[in-house]
Image (cartoon, rainbow, N blue to C red):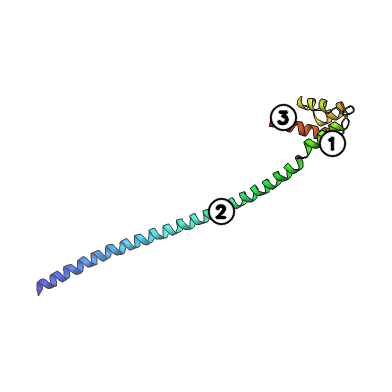
Amino acid sequence: MLIALVVLGCTCVTLAVVLAFLLRDQRHQSVLLTQQAAHVAELDQRAKELAKRLEAFQQINVRMGEQLRELGNQVAPLPERLNRIEQRDPASLSFSQAARLVGLGASAAELSQSCGLSRAEAELMARLHANKQQAG
């Protein structure tokens, strides 16, 4: 009977030691879980911020595309319009001379003075031929 009590006492002590280790591990796991939850919340917040930034960039990209399309629509008829102007009265309007001057870096004001073009025509020539030089 005494042996059974000693064995039972040793078993109880062993169970108490195992229980203490398990409780310590449970507290450690709880701390780790809390830290991981905070980290996940931090990452979630960062993901939301990045999603907002991405949406803003996409909206800007769409607006830029729309503005680019609009500019393209405005510029598309200019070469044809310039050809019509050149063909209208080549004796009084020296568009070929103006094109050469633009190639040499003349401003719209200089074109207007030296070629007898209106201010709008000179600006059109300067923009059109400057674009051709940049494309080429």
Q: Nearer the viewer, mark 1 or mark 2?
A: 1
Q: Mark 2 or mark 3, which has the lower sequence index?
A: 2
Which element type, helix, strand or loop, lies under badge 1? Answer: helix
Which residue corresponds to the image point at 84% horizontal and 36% vertical from the top-left?
120
Distance (Cα) linking label 1 and label 2:
46 Å
**Disc 1 target residue:** 120
Q: Mark 1 or mark 2, which has the lower sequence index?
A: 2
Res. 123 in view: no
Q: Residue 94 location in percent, x, y? A: 85, 27
Q: Residue 36 location in percent, x, y? A: 42, 57
Question: Which amino acid type is marked by label 1?
Answer: Ala
Q: Mark 3 or mark 1, which has the lower sequence index?
A: 1
- Left or right of 38: which side holds 30? left
- Left or right of 18: which side holds 110? right
Distance (Cα) linking label 3 and label 1:
20 Å
Which residue corresponds to the image point at 83% horizontal and 28% vertical from the top-left?
95
Q: Is 110 in front, or is 50?
A: 110
**Disc 3 target residue:** 133
- Mark 3 crowd level (few <14, some 14–19, many ≥20, 10 Å Cα): few
Question: Which amino acid type is marked by label 3?
Answer: Gln
Which quadrant is the C terminus positioned in? top right
**Disc 2 target residue:** 51
Residue 70 lies in quadrant = top right
- Check if mark 1's residue and mark 2's residue have beta carbons within 8 Å: no
Distance (Cα) linking label 2 and label 3:
41 Å
| Numbered label attached to residue 60 | none
Q: Residue 18 location in percent, x, y? A: 24, 64
Res. 122 in view: yes
Question: Which amino acid type is marked by label 2?
Answer: Ala
